[in-house]
Image (cartoon, rainbow, N blue to C red):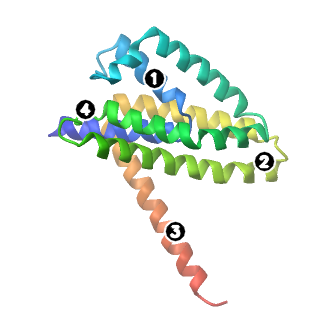
Amino acid sequence: MLDAFSNLFTAFGLSASAGLNAYLPLLVVALSAKYTGLITLNKPWDVMTSWWVIGVLVVLLLIEMTVDKIPAVDTVNDVIQTVGRPVAGAVLFAASSGVVGDLHPVVAFVAGLLLAGTIHTAKTVARPAVTATTGGTGNWLVSIIEDILAFITAILAILLPILIGLTVIALLLLYFWWRARRSRTRMVPA
């Protein structure tokens, strides 16, 4: 039972990190599955350990990490990644949940899609505000912080999945509390 929760929390953590950077967690999972026993990818996801896939992920990661640091280009990249990041989250959730035998694959795929898509949406909405308030000079720093968070989240999701699961749950609860509080303050007349 604990193993199933651990696998599920790993899936949540990896999907969440894909919302910030599509290719970094995919590459972390591919390399972890190829060189360690920390992740075992079942078919068809084991194709991620192929050198061709790893090479493509490296190239895509370098492109995304470069364009994401350039003002205006990062916005175009976010529009393009509106498909890429949620799909990466869905693949990571389905590939790493380990309970896909017990959890219907469509449910796993949709859960990853929604989680990564939500985080991607928050990033996409926040980034133009960073560009506007800093004149574009803060984009590279915010992008680096997002990359670091995506990397740390992916690593911790693999090594300490329970911690990631509790963190994701706490952040979601905090977000919903904030939204409810914000909507209540809008209803109160000034």
- Between residues 47 and 124, which one lies in front from this camera angle? 47
Q: At x 72% / y 43%, what residue is drawn?
A: 75
Dot placed on the residue nearer the N-terminal end, 4 or 1:
1
In front: label 4 or label 3: 4
The answer to whether marks 4 and 3 mark residues whose Cβ atoms lie closer than 8 Å is no
Give the residue type that dot 2 points to.
Thr
The spot of residue 142 in percent (x, y) is 68, 40
Q: Residues within 10 Å of mark 1 (few under 14, many from 20)?
A: some
Q: Earlier in the sequence, mark 1 or mark 2?
A: 1
Of callouts 1 and 3, the N-terminal one: 1
145 relative position to 183: left or right: right
Q: Which mark is residue 131?
A: 2
Residue reaching furthest to the left: 1
Q: Which residue is mark 1?
A: 28
Choose mark 4 or mark 1, whichever is in front.
Answer: 4
* Residue 27 left/right relative to 45: right
Question: In what quadrant of the picture does the N terminus appear?
Answer: top left
